[in-house]
Image (cartoon, rainbow, N blue to C red):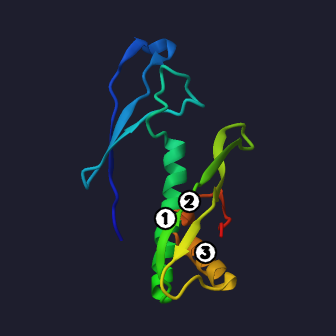
């Protein structure tokens, strides 16, 4: 159907590469021109070898899931004639160790807060159906094995 490309650039900077004393900061570039400073998470690699101001892969993973849900929810609402004026979320990803002891983002909780326009808020049942349909149709949610929980705030 389509191809999506991200270019990454990293260059050695640090005291001792073989001892792990080097910067994990790098850059993500996307075809539309966006450039995102990235780094290992300071929860994984301590400062100064990580940059907490940059986006880390785990945060980006959580943001991608939340963004996909948002976009799918808004699309589904528009198709049902429901006007969405604002959608905010504070998504949280939790890392645990898998059966082999390897850390992974095992759960992502989405907490969307949706404000509606003309016509007002749909019934709780319709809103729940929209979130369920958005989750079922989200490309990213369908691409991962992490548990994804949607807890709408309202």
Q: Which residue is mark 1?
A: 68
Residue 129 is situated, as x and y percent measured from the top left of the image, at: 64, 81
Asked if residue 24 lies left or right of residue 136, the reply is left
**Picture quadrant of residue 147:** bottom right
Residue 139 can be seen, yes or no: no
Closer to the N terminus: mark 3 or mark 1? 1
Q: Which residue is mark 3?
A: 131
Question: Which quarter of the rendered picture does the C terminus lie within?
Answer: bottom right
- Looking at the rendered structure, the secondary structure element under dot 3 is helix
Contact flag, marks 2 and 3 (Cβ < 8 Å): no
Residue 44 is marked as none
Residue 20 is situated, as x and y percent measured from the top left of the image, at: 50, 17
Q: Is residue 66 above or below residue 41?
A: below
Residue 102 is situated, as x and y percent measured from the top left of the image, at: 67, 38
Residue at 46% x, 87% y is: 79
As measured in the structure, the alpha-carbon distance from the residue carrying label 3 to the one carrying label 1 is 12 Å
Closer to the N terminus: mark 1 or mark 2? 1
Q: Which residue is mark 2?
A: 89
How dense is the environment of label 2, judged by Cα within 10 Å: few (below 14), some, or many (20 and up)? some
């Amino acid at each position: 159907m389509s191809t999506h490309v991200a270019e990454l650039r990293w260059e050695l900077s640090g005291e001792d590469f073989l001892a792990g004393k080097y910067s994990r900061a790098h850059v993500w570039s996307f075809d539309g021109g966006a450039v995102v400073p990235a780094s290992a998470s300071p929860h994984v690699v301590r400062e100064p070898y990580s940059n907490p101001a940059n986006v880390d892969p785990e945060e980006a993973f959580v943001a991608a899931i939340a963004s996909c849900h948002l976009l799918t929810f808004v699309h589904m609402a528009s198709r049902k004639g429901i006007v969405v004026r604002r959608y905010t979320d504070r998504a949280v990803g939790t890392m645990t160790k898998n059966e082999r002891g390897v850390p992974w983002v095992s759960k992502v909780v989405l907490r969307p807060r949706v404000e509606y326009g003309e016509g007002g808020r749909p019934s709780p049942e319709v809103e729940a159906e929209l979130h369920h349909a958005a989750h079922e149709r989200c490309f990213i949610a369908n691409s991962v094995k992490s548990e994804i929980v949607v807890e709408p705030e309202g």
